[in-house]
Image (cartoon, rainbow, N blue to C red):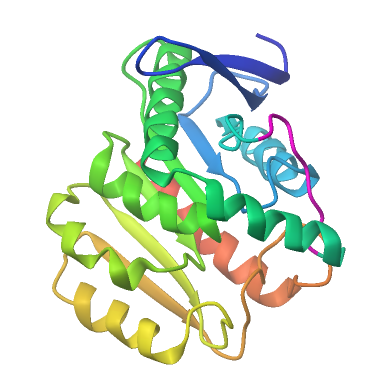
């Protein structure tokens, strides 16, 4: 399997979808699933996979919008494309998306030889899906950046049995202060979950490219993520 796109079979076995794939030079330490934003598996998401591969991990980014529009890539800094992404999220079946993430975890384990560890890291929509995956899949560690609507998923947290890390920008215009407080309060007693706040940061601060990125905050969060995966994978 060379770097590029690789097909993943659905859990039901009734179809396949593509995932971007990046391989490390030596034997992989583990695998990491990079879960897309609402903008598809675009250049920024692929760059994150490439970075994990350079750090010794097998990396996959499944095309979760494949049932809506396969291989779509959108730029959040281009207003019509941003609006197009908002339209896609309204049609996206998140429960089905989690099953596709589970299928990717299964494929990643097979690529590792069957018993390797698999982590998930997601951004925006992917941050929410990473939390859902922690509740519903057999992955080994989960990281969510600025996940939207996690305050509405807290009833599922009893199913979390593996480590979870959540990065929360305090000025996230998609996740208000009330929702952030609900996350902190609701997850305070869950020994598996760690939350970090990023004062003054907005949604998308850890994107690889574009106007939303804040270098210092992104590097701080990414360093914590790398340490977290090193400890748990």
Horizontally, residue 98 falls left or right of residue 153, namely: right
- Please indicate, yes or no, whether residue 228 appears anywhere in the rendered image: no
Q: Position of residue 135 (x, y in %)?
A: 24, 48
Would you say residue 148 sits in the magenta stretch?
Answer: no
Helix, strand or loop: magenta stretch? loop
Q: Position of residue 38 (x, y in %)?
A: 63, 53
Residue at figure coordinates x 42%, y 50% from the top left: 129
Horizontally, residue 177 falls left or right of residue 146, namely: left
Q: Is residue 130 above or below residue 214?
A: above
Q: Is residue 185 above or below residue 59?
A: below
Residue at figure coordinates x 38%, y 20% from the top left: 106
Quadrant where the C terminus sits is top left
- Which range of residues does the magenta coloring cover? 69-76
Residue at figure coordinates x 84%, y 61% from the top left: 80
Would you say residue 75 sits in the magenta stretch?
Answer: yes
Q: Is residue 19 above or below residue 161?
A: above
Residue at figure coordinates x 71%, y 12% from the top left: 2
Q: Nearer the viewer, residue 21 or 126?
A: 126
- Please indicate, yes or no, whether residue 39 appears anywhere in the rendered image: yes
Residue 24, quarter of the rendered image = top right
Q: Nearer the viewer, residue 70 or 222?
A: 70
Q: Position of residue 76 (x, y in %)?
A: 78, 62
| Count of numbered circles in the view | 0
Quadrant where the N terminus sits is top right
Q: Position of residue 174 (x, y in %)?
A: 55, 77
Q: Is residue 63 above or below residue 34?
A: above
């Amino acid at each position: 399997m060379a770097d590029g796109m690789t097909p993943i079979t659905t859990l039901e076995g009734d179809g396949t979808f593509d995932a971007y794939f990046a391989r490390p030079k030596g034997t992989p330490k583990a695998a990491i699933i990079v879960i897309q934003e609402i903008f598809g598996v675009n250049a920024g998401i692929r760059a994150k996979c490439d970075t994990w591969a350079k750090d010794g991990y097998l990396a996959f980014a499944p095309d979760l919008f494949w049932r809506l529009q396969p291989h779509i890539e959108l730029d959040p800094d281009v207003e019509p494309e941003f609006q197009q992404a908002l339209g896609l999220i309204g049609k996206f079946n998140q429960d089905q998306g989690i099953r596709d993430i589970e299928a990717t975890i299964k494929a990643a384990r097979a690529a590792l030889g069957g018993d390797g560890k698999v982590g998930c890291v997601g951004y925006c929509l992917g941050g929410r899906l990473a939390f859902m995956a922690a509740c519903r899949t057999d992955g080994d560690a989960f990281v969510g950046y600025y996940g939207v609507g996690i305050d509405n998923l807290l009833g599922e947290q009893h199913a979390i049995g593996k480590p979870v890390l959540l990065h929360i920008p305090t000025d996230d215009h998609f996740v208000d202060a009330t929702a952030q407080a609900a996350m902190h309060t609701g997850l305070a007693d869950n020994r598996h979950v760690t939350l970090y706040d990023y004062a003054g940061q907005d949604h998308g601060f850890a994107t690889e490219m574009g106007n939303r990125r804040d270098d210092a905050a992104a590097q701080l969060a990414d360093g914590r993520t790398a340490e977290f995966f090193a400890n748990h994978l």
